[in-house]
Image: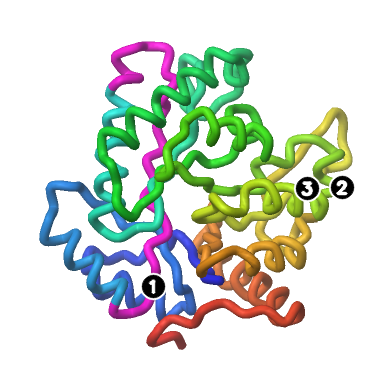
Amino acid sequence: MRLGASLETGSEDPEEIARTYAIAGYSAAVCPPLWLEQRERIRAIREAFHRHDVVLAEVGVWNNMLHPDPDHRTANVEANIHALALADEVGALCCVNIAGSFHPARWDAPHPRNLSEEAFELTVQNVRRIVDSVMPKRARYTLETMPWMIPDSADSYLRLIEAVDRPMFGVHLDPVNLINCPSRYYDNAGFLRECFAKLGPWIVSCHGKDILLREQLTVHLDEVRPGLGALNYNVFLHELSRLRGDVPLILEHLPPEEYPAARDYVVGVATQAGLSFHTPRGAA
């Protein structure tokens, strides 16, 4: 397995950025800001991360491919085509986005139509267009699992994979995003096993977070730092370790000062379970 993060390095130098990840003990990373037209910078980033044995896990897009305005929607899909081509060029494992939302103001908000057949069909069309436009040789295109949009379960993702029917369409698993009710929360170990059993062959990258059910009505589920919630990391890491290749686990959504504690917790669980993460060259 590879453990990674999305770090703010304070540098534009590819060598310095890659070295920062390696020194911190991360063998995977989120791709730094980059454009497809920056050919020399793409080469420099690819070579620097390879030199430090840090895998570029993902190129994130983070826009709304179900935007209610057709022109915005088209432009956002085009941005995904650009990002997938970039991921393929820089050597990232995947390009990742969310399916999108029909909400008129927020790109990732809940909306009554987000889980509709209309949303499903539009998402299939969007993914096919992105993959067919790029025809990537290495990088997969993926959609991050989400609590209130497609795909919101392992079965939802399987249906999407079958409908898209493209070998370069993969799975980006964020199990915390899928825990959207008390039953999944309390049996998250079983839920994790279900996700890996059904989606394992397609999983390209994972996000590492934690979740906490608050004791107040109605239902309040909060994302928290790994180790401060109820996610069964023992099961999570055991299932992750069984996947083919060193699939990255990327820590995210934390203030810079909290990443070391999150990393230490996840590494500690792995060590107690007899598992290990890949060590990059130059790790402290």
- Mark nearer the N terminus (3 vs 2): 2
Q: Which mark is residue 186?
A: 2
Q: Residue at x 53, y 18 (%)?
A: 119
Image quarter for residue 238? bottom right
At label 1, the amino acid type is: Val
Q: CA distance from mark 3 to mark 2?
A: 9 Å
Q: Residue at x 35, y 52 (%)?
A: 139
Image quarter for residue 141? top left
**Residue 189 in the image, given as x and y percentages of width and height:** 81, 55
Taking the magenta stretch, the answer to whether it contains residue 177 is no
Q: Please tell me which residue lies in front, 126 or 279.
A: 126
Mark 1 lies on residue: 54
Q: CA distance from mark 3 to mark 1?
A: 30 Å
**Secondary structure type for disc 1:** loop
Mark 1 Cα within 10 Å, few/some/many (few <14, many 20+)? many
- Mark nearer the N terminus (3 vs 1): 1
**Residue 195 in the image, given as x and y percentages of width and height:** 69, 48
